[in-house]
Amino acid sequence: MSIEPEDLARTALVRMIRGRRYRLAGPTDARFSDIMANAFRVAYRQQGAEPSLLIFSGPGHDPEAAGRAAAEWAAANWRPNAVQRKVRPGVVVVQVAPGSQLKPAGALQGVPVTAAIWAVDSASGRTQTAGRPSGAPPARELKRAAAALMNGLPAPSLGELDLAEREVMRLRTVRIAPLVTGCLAISLVFYGLRYGLTAFSGVFTWSALLSSGGSAAVGVSPGVALGGLAADVLLLAGIGLGLGVLLNVRGLAFAAPGFSSPSPRVRTATWVGYGAVMVALALVLQMALPDVVARQNRSAAHAEGMHVTATTDDDGSEAAVLLGGDLTVDLSSWPAAEWQGVEFRSSNPAVLEMQPAAPWTKAPTALFDAVGVGTARVDATSADGRFTFELRVSVIRG
Protein backbone atom coordinates (compact mmCIF):
# COMPACT_ATOMS: atom_id res chain seq x y z
CA MET A 1 0.00 0.00 0.00
CA SER A 2 1.32 3.45 -0.93
CA ILE A 3 0.39 6.94 0.25
CA GLU A 4 -1.23 9.50 -2.02
CA PRO A 5 0.28 12.95 -1.39
CA GLU A 6 -3.13 14.63 -1.21
CA ASP A 7 -4.37 12.03 1.30
CA LEU A 8 -1.38 12.66 3.55
CA ALA A 9 -1.89 16.43 3.37
CA ARG A 10 -5.56 16.17 4.32
CA THR A 11 -4.93 13.69 7.14
CA ALA A 12 -2.19 15.82 8.69
CA LEU A 13 -3.89 19.17 8.11
CA VAL A 14 -7.18 18.24 9.80
CA ARG A 15 -5.36 17.90 13.13
CA MET A 16 -2.87 20.70 12.50
CA ILE A 17 -5.61 23.17 11.61
CA ARG A 18 -7.47 22.49 14.84
CA GLY A 19 -4.42 22.25 17.08
CA ARG A 20 -2.21 24.95 15.52
CA ARG A 21 -4.85 27.21 13.86
CA TYR A 22 -3.52 26.99 10.32
CA ARG A 23 -5.42 28.53 7.40
CA LEU A 24 -5.54 27.01 3.91
CA ALA A 25 -4.42 28.95 0.88
CA GLY A 26 -6.38 28.45 -2.33
CA PRO A 27 -4.57 27.14 -5.42
CA THR A 28 -5.17 30.49 -7.16
CA ASP A 29 -4.07 32.66 -4.23
CA ALA A 30 -1.83 35.26 -5.91
CA ARG A 31 0.20 35.73 -2.72
CA PHE A 32 1.66 32.25 -2.99
CA SER A 33 1.92 31.87 -6.76
CA ASP A 34 5.71 31.36 -6.66
CA ILE A 35 5.31 28.70 -3.98
CA MET A 36 2.41 26.88 -5.66
CA ALA A 37 4.61 26.24 -8.70
CA ASN A 38 6.28 23.46 -6.66
CA ALA A 39 3.49 22.55 -4.23
CA PHE A 40 -0.06 21.23 -4.19
CA ARG A 41 -1.10 22.42 -0.71
CA VAL A 42 -0.14 25.55 1.25
CA ALA A 43 -1.24 26.33 4.79
CA TYR A 44 -0.20 29.30 6.87
CA ARG A 45 -0.46 30.60 10.43
CA GLN A 46 0.25 34.30 10.79
CA GLN A 47 -0.73 35.07 14.41
CA GLY A 48 1.82 35.53 17.15
CA ALA A 49 5.57 35.88 17.26
CA GLU A 50 6.24 32.70 15.25
CA PRO A 51 4.15 32.71 12.06
CA SER A 52 4.55 29.62 9.93
CA LEU A 53 4.14 28.35 6.38
CA LEU A 54 3.38 24.65 5.88
CA ILE A 55 3.84 23.48 2.31
CA PHE A 56 3.11 20.05 0.79
CA SER A 57 5.18 19.16 -2.25
CA GLY A 58 4.57 16.05 -4.40
CA PRO A 59 6.33 14.03 -7.11
CA GLY A 60 7.80 16.20 -9.85
CA HIS A 61 8.01 19.24 -7.57
CA ASP A 62 11.17 20.86 -6.29
CA PRO A 63 10.73 21.14 -2.50
CA GLU A 64 13.90 23.18 -2.11
CA ALA A 65 12.65 25.78 -4.60
CA ALA A 66 9.29 25.87 -2.79
CA GLY A 67 11.04 26.34 0.55
CA ARG A 68 13.25 29.16 -0.71
CA ALA A 69 10.30 30.95 -2.31
CA ALA A 70 8.30 30.56 0.91
CA ALA A 71 11.19 31.84 3.02
CA GLU A 72 11.55 34.92 0.80
CA TRP A 73 7.81 35.59 1.03
CA ALA A 74 7.76 35.13 4.83
CA ALA A 75 10.73 37.47 5.32
CA ALA A 76 9.10 40.14 3.16
CA ASN A 77 5.57 39.95 4.63
CA TRP A 78 5.94 38.94 8.27
CA ARG A 79 7.80 41.80 9.90
CA PRO A 80 7.82 43.29 13.41
CA ASN A 81 5.30 46.03 14.06
CA ALA A 82 4.03 48.19 16.89
CA VAL A 83 1.94 45.33 18.31
CA GLN A 84 4.28 42.40 17.66
CA ARG A 85 7.79 43.63 18.39
CA LYS A 86 9.53 40.32 17.61
CA VAL A 87 8.66 38.04 14.70
CA ARG A 88 10.46 34.77 13.88
CA PRO A 89 8.82 33.20 10.81
CA GLY A 90 9.40 29.57 9.89
CA VAL A 91 8.82 27.39 6.82
CA VAL A 92 8.27 23.63 6.61
CA VAL A 93 8.09 21.87 3.24
CA VAL A 94 6.69 18.33 3.40
CA GLN A 95 7.79 16.37 0.35
CA VAL A 96 5.66 13.28 -0.35
CA ALA A 97 7.14 11.09 -3.09
CA PRO A 98 8.69 7.67 -3.75
CA GLY A 99 12.01 7.16 -1.99
CA SER A 100 14.03 7.56 -5.20
CA GLN A 101 12.66 11.09 -5.73
CA LEU A 102 13.00 12.39 -2.19
CA LYS A 103 15.38 15.23 -1.49
CA PRO A 104 17.48 14.98 1.71
CA ALA A 105 15.53 16.11 4.75
CA GLY A 106 16.93 18.87 6.92
CA ALA A 107 17.30 22.62 7.33
CA LEU A 108 17.58 24.84 4.27
CA GLN A 109 20.71 26.96 4.17
CA GLY A 110 21.05 30.50 2.83
CA VAL A 111 17.43 31.55 3.38
CA PRO A 112 16.28 34.65 5.31
CA VAL A 113 14.10 32.72 7.80
CA THR A 114 14.36 29.28 9.39
CA ALA A 115 13.18 26.62 6.95
CA ALA A 116 13.39 22.86 6.60
CA ILE A 117 12.35 20.01 4.33
CA TRP A 118 10.53 17.04 5.85
CA ALA A 119 10.33 13.93 3.68
CA VAL A 120 7.71 11.17 3.55
CA ASP A 121 8.34 8.02 1.49
CA SER A 122 4.98 7.38 -0.20
CA ALA A 123 5.81 3.68 -0.65
CA SER A 124 6.82 2.80 2.92
CA GLY A 125 5.37 5.67 4.98
CA ARG A 126 8.81 6.39 6.49
CA THR A 127 9.16 10.00 7.59
CA GLN A 128 12.23 12.16 8.10
CA THR A 129 11.68 15.34 10.08
CA ALA A 130 15.17 16.76 10.60
CA GLY A 131 15.24 20.44 11.50
CA ARG A 132 12.79 22.43 13.57
CA PRO A 133 11.92 25.86 12.10
CA SER A 134 10.23 28.55 14.19
CA GLY A 135 6.52 27.89 14.66
CA ALA A 136 6.72 24.49 12.97
CA PRO A 137 3.89 22.03 13.73
CA PRO A 138 4.68 18.93 15.80
CA ALA A 139 6.49 16.34 13.69
CA ARG A 140 4.50 13.60 15.41
CA GLU A 141 1.35 14.75 13.58
CA LEU A 142 3.00 14.01 10.24
CA LYS A 143 4.19 10.62 11.46
CA ARG A 144 0.75 9.81 12.85
CA ALA A 145 -0.90 10.70 9.53
CA ALA A 146 1.54 8.55 7.54
CA ALA A 147 1.06 5.60 9.89
CA ALA A 148 -2.74 5.89 9.70
CA LEU A 149 -2.74 5.82 5.90
CA MET A 150 -0.30 2.90 5.78
CA ASN A 151 -2.67 1.00 8.08
CA GLY A 152 -5.49 1.46 5.59
CA LEU A 153 -7.46 4.22 7.30
CA PRO A 154 -9.29 6.50 4.86
CA ALA A 155 -8.15 10.09 4.42
CA PRO A 156 -10.48 12.92 5.52
CA SER A 157 -12.65 14.40 2.81
CA LEU A 158 -12.40 17.95 1.54
CA GLY A 159 -15.55 18.68 3.54
CA GLU A 160 -13.85 17.64 6.79
CA LEU A 161 -10.90 19.86 5.93
CA ASP A 162 -13.21 22.78 5.24
CA LEU A 163 -15.15 22.15 8.46
CA ALA A 164 -11.95 22.14 10.52
CA GLU A 165 -10.92 25.49 9.05
CA ARG A 166 -14.35 27.04 9.61
CA GLU A 167 -14.32 25.89 13.25
CA VAL A 168 -10.99 27.64 13.77
CA MET A 169 -12.19 30.81 12.01
CA ARG A 170 -15.41 30.94 14.05
CA LEU A 171 -15.19 33.75 16.60
CA ARG A 172 -16.16 33.14 20.17
CA THR A 173 -19.62 34.47 20.96
CA VAL A 174 -18.32 36.14 24.14
CA ARG A 175 -14.75 37.29 24.38
CA ILE A 176 -12.98 37.18 27.70
CA ALA A 177 -12.00 40.68 28.75
CA PRO A 178 -8.24 41.23 29.03
CA LEU A 179 -8.76 42.42 32.63
CA VAL A 180 -10.43 39.10 33.53
CA THR A 181 -7.70 37.12 31.79
CA GLY A 182 -5.03 39.13 33.60
CA CYS A 183 -6.68 38.64 36.99
CA LEU A 184 -7.01 34.91 36.37
CA ALA A 185 -3.37 34.68 35.31
CA ILE A 186 -2.18 36.61 38.39
CA SER A 187 -4.34 34.44 40.65
CA LEU A 188 -2.89 31.29 39.08
CA VAL A 189 0.64 32.60 39.49
CA PHE A 190 0.05 33.28 43.21
CA TYR A 191 -1.69 29.92 43.54
CA GLY A 192 1.27 28.26 41.86
CA LEU A 193 3.74 29.98 44.18
CA ARG A 194 1.64 29.09 47.23
CA TYR A 195 0.92 25.47 46.45
CA GLY A 196 3.06 24.60 43.45
CA LEU A 197 6.40 24.75 45.24
CA THR A 198 5.00 22.67 48.11
CA ALA A 199 3.60 20.14 45.66
CA PHE A 200 6.89 20.05 43.73
CA SER A 201 8.87 19.20 46.86
CA GLY A 202 6.13 16.80 47.92
CA VAL A 203 6.55 14.77 44.72
CA PHE A 204 10.19 14.09 45.58
CA THR A 205 9.41 13.42 49.26
CA TRP A 206 6.62 10.91 48.60
CA SER A 207 8.60 9.27 45.79
CA ALA A 208 11.61 8.80 48.06
CA LEU A 209 9.44 7.30 50.82
CA LEU A 210 7.75 4.89 48.41
CA SER A 211 10.92 3.82 46.62
CA SER A 212 12.87 3.22 49.83
CA GLY A 213 10.00 1.72 51.78
CA GLY A 214 10.53 4.35 54.45
CA SER A 215 6.89 5.43 54.75
CA ALA A 216 6.32 3.03 57.65
CA ALA A 217 9.36 4.47 59.45
CA VAL A 218 7.67 7.86 59.65
CA GLY A 219 4.30 6.39 60.60
CA VAL A 220 2.65 6.69 57.16
CA SER A 221 1.12 3.79 55.26
CA PRO A 222 2.11 3.21 51.59
CA GLY A 223 -1.48 3.95 50.52
CA VAL A 224 -1.40 7.41 52.10
CA ALA A 225 2.03 8.09 50.57
CA LEU A 226 0.73 7.06 47.13
CA GLY A 227 -2.31 9.29 47.56
CA GLY A 228 -0.12 12.25 48.52
CA LEU A 229 2.09 11.69 45.48
CA ALA A 230 -0.94 11.53 43.16
CA ALA A 231 -2.43 14.74 44.64
CA ASP A 232 0.88 16.62 44.24
CA VAL A 233 1.28 15.47 40.62
CA LEU A 234 -2.32 16.43 39.76
CA LEU A 235 -1.88 19.84 41.38
CA LEU A 236 1.27 20.56 39.38
CA ALA A 237 -0.39 19.38 36.15
CA GLY A 238 -3.44 21.55 36.88
CA ILE A 239 -1.34 24.67 37.48
CA GLY A 240 0.54 24.04 34.24
CA LEU A 241 -2.70 23.50 32.31
CA GLY A 242 -4.30 26.68 33.64
CA LEU A 243 -1.31 28.86 32.86
CA GLY A 244 -0.90 27.21 29.45
CA VAL A 245 -4.53 27.97 28.52
CA LEU A 246 -4.51 31.55 29.83
CA LEU A 247 -1.20 32.38 28.15
CA ASN A 248 -2.06 30.27 25.07
CA VAL A 249 1.22 28.36 25.17
CA ARG A 250 1.67 26.60 21.80
CA GLY A 251 -1.98 27.21 20.90
CA LEU A 252 -3.31 25.37 23.97
CA ALA A 253 -6.18 27.82 24.42
CA PHE A 254 -7.55 26.77 21.03
CA ALA A 255 -6.92 23.05 21.44
CA ALA A 256 -7.80 22.15 25.05
CA PRO A 257 -11.25 20.51 25.25
CA GLY A 258 -13.83 22.67 26.98
CA PHE A 259 -11.55 25.71 27.31
CA SER A 260 -11.61 26.20 23.51
CA SER A 261 -15.35 25.61 23.04
CA PRO A 262 -17.23 28.25 20.99
CA SER A 263 -20.05 28.05 23.56
CA PRO A 264 -19.60 30.48 26.47
CA ARG A 265 -21.65 28.17 28.69
CA VAL A 266 -19.27 25.26 28.08
CA ARG A 267 -16.22 27.47 28.63
CA THR A 268 -17.66 28.83 31.88
CA ALA A 269 -18.55 25.35 33.11
CA THR A 270 -15.05 24.13 32.25
CA TRP A 271 -13.37 26.96 34.17
CA VAL A 272 -15.70 26.46 37.15
CA GLY A 273 -14.96 22.74 37.18
CA TYR A 274 -11.24 23.45 36.86
CA GLY A 275 -11.35 25.85 39.80
CA ALA A 276 -13.32 23.38 41.92
CA VAL A 277 -10.80 20.62 41.24
CA MET A 278 -7.85 22.88 42.08
CA VAL A 279 -9.47 24.04 45.34
CA ALA A 280 -10.26 20.41 46.23
CA LEU A 281 -6.66 19.38 45.61
CA ALA A 282 -5.40 22.26 47.75
CA LEU A 283 -7.76 21.23 50.58
CA VAL A 284 -6.59 17.64 50.31
CA LEU A 285 -2.93 18.64 50.54
CA GLN A 286 -3.37 21.29 53.23
CA MET A 287 -6.02 19.72 55.45
CA ALA A 288 -7.12 16.17 54.71
CA LEU A 289 -3.73 14.62 54.05
CA PRO A 290 -1.94 16.16 57.08
CA ASP A 291 -4.86 15.05 59.27
CA VAL A 292 -4.57 11.45 58.02
CA VAL A 293 -0.80 11.49 58.55
CA ALA A 294 -1.22 12.92 62.09
CA ARG A 295 -3.78 10.24 62.97
CA GLN A 296 -1.51 7.50 61.68
CA ASN A 297 1.38 8.96 63.66
CA ARG A 298 -0.79 9.02 66.78
CA SER A 299 -1.79 5.42 66.18
CA ALA A 300 1.86 4.44 65.76
CA ALA A 301 2.81 6.34 68.91
CA HIS A 302 -0.07 4.71 70.81
CA ALA A 303 1.02 1.24 69.69
CA GLU A 304 4.59 2.05 70.71
CA GLY A 305 3.45 3.28 74.14
CA MET A 306 1.56 0.07 74.82
CA HIS A 307 4.66 -2.13 74.61
CA VAL A 308 7.81 -0.43 75.90
CA THR A 309 11.23 -2.05 76.21
CA ALA A 310 14.08 -0.78 78.38
CA THR A 311 17.69 -1.98 78.34
CA THR A 312 20.86 -1.19 80.26
CA ASP A 313 21.27 1.87 78.05
CA ASP A 314 18.19 3.35 79.77
CA ASP A 315 19.71 3.08 83.28
CA GLY A 316 18.95 6.25 85.22
CA SER A 317 16.47 7.58 82.67
CA GLU A 318 12.68 7.83 82.42
CA ALA A 319 10.05 5.97 80.40
CA ALA A 320 6.32 6.38 79.76
CA VAL A 321 3.86 3.50 79.41
CA LEU A 322 0.18 3.71 78.51
CA LEU A 323 -2.31 2.36 81.04
CA GLY A 324 -3.01 -1.27 80.19
CA GLY A 325 0.32 -1.66 78.43
CA ASP A 326 3.49 -3.35 79.58
CA LEU A 327 7.17 -2.67 80.16
CA THR A 328 9.90 -5.19 79.43
CA VAL A 329 13.25 -4.67 81.18
CA ASP A 330 16.04 -6.54 79.40
CA LEU A 331 19.44 -6.61 81.14
CA SER A 332 20.98 -9.33 78.99
CA SER A 333 23.87 -7.02 78.10
CA TRP A 334 25.23 -7.55 81.63
CA PRO A 335 28.04 -10.18 81.77
CA ALA A 336 26.61 -13.70 81.60
CA ALA A 337 28.31 -14.50 84.91
CA GLU A 338 25.99 -11.97 86.60
CA TRP A 339 22.73 -13.30 85.12
CA GLN A 340 22.05 -15.76 87.92
CA GLY A 341 20.21 -14.27 90.87
CA VAL A 342 19.36 -10.84 89.42
CA GLU A 343 16.53 -9.35 91.50
CA PHE A 344 13.86 -7.02 89.98
CA ARG A 345 11.56 -4.79 92.05
CA SER A 346 8.74 -2.30 91.45
CA SER A 347 8.54 0.54 93.92
CA ASN A 348 4.78 0.91 93.39
CA PRO A 349 3.03 -2.37 92.46
CA ALA A 350 -0.32 -0.54 92.34
CA VAL A 351 0.99 1.33 89.30
CA LEU A 352 3.55 -1.09 87.84
CA GLU A 353 3.02 -4.75 88.71
CA MET A 354 5.81 -7.26 88.00
CA GLN A 355 4.84 -10.58 86.41
CA PRO A 356 6.47 -13.86 87.52
CA ALA A 357 9.51 -14.77 85.43
CA ALA A 358 9.25 -17.76 83.10
CA PRO A 359 11.14 -20.74 84.56
CA TRP A 360 13.03 -21.35 81.31
CA THR A 361 14.32 -17.78 81.06
CA LYS A 362 18.07 -17.53 81.65
CA ALA A 363 18.70 -13.94 80.64
CA PRO A 364 17.83 -11.29 83.27
CA THR A 365 14.52 -9.95 81.93
CA ALA A 366 11.33 -8.93 83.67
CA LEU A 367 7.82 -7.97 82.52
CA PHE A 368 5.80 -5.26 84.28
CA ASP A 369 2.11 -4.51 83.63
CA ALA A 370 0.88 -0.91 83.80
CA VAL A 371 -2.16 -1.38 86.06
CA GLY A 372 -2.68 2.13 87.39
CA VAL A 373 -2.01 5.75 86.55
CA GLY A 374 0.95 7.19 88.41
CA THR A 375 4.70 6.84 88.79
CA ALA A 376 6.89 3.97 89.88
CA ARG A 377 10.53 2.99 89.89
CA VAL A 378 11.99 -0.24 88.57
CA ASP A 379 15.14 -1.42 90.32
CA ALA A 380 17.40 -4.38 89.54
CA THR A 381 20.51 -5.64 91.31
CA SER A 382 22.90 -8.45 90.49
CA ALA A 383 23.47 -11.19 93.12
CA ASP A 384 26.86 -9.81 94.17
CA GLY A 385 25.66 -6.19 94.07
CA ARG A 386 28.23 -5.12 91.45
CA PHE A 387 25.60 -4.19 88.86
CA THR A 388 22.49 -2.09 89.48
CA PHE A 389 19.71 -0.68 87.29
CA GLU A 390 17.15 2.04 87.94
CA LEU A 391 14.34 3.34 85.71
CA ARG A 392 11.66 5.90 86.56
CA VAL A 393 8.34 4.98 84.91
CA SER A 394 5.22 7.11 84.36
CA VAL A 395 1.97 5.31 83.57
CA ILE A 396 -0.40 7.57 81.68
CA ARG A 397 -3.79 7.29 80.03
CA GLY A 398 -3.82 6.86 76.22
Image (tube, grey):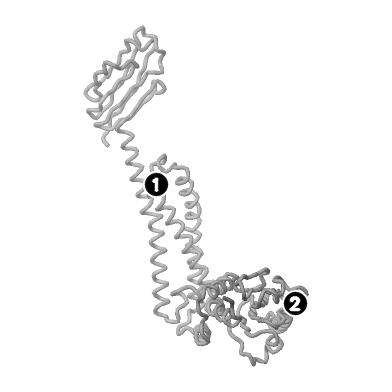
Q: Residue furthest front?
A: 1
The residue that mark 2 highlights is 112
Helix, strand or loop status at disc 1? helix
User: Which corner quadrant of the image does residue 280 belong to?
Assistant: bottom left
Helix, strand or loop status at disc 2? loop
Q: Measured along the vertical axis of the image, is residue 230 above or below residue 268?
A: above
Amino acid of disc 2: Pro
* Residue at point 70%, 77% (across, down): 101
Q: Position of residue 154 (x, y in %)?
A: 50, 79
The residue that mark 1 highlights is 222
Nearer to the camera, 242 or 111: 111
From the image, which quarter does the N terminus lie in?
Answer: bottom right
Going from the N terminus, do you reach mark 2 or mark 1 first?
2
Residue 248 appearing in the image: no
* Residue at point 47%, 49% (across, down): 207
Binning the other alpha carbons within 10 Å of mark 1 as few (below 14), some (14 to 19) or many (20 upward) gives: some
Residue 233 appearing in the image: yes
Q: Measured along the vertical axis of the image, is residue 271 above or below residue 174?
A: above
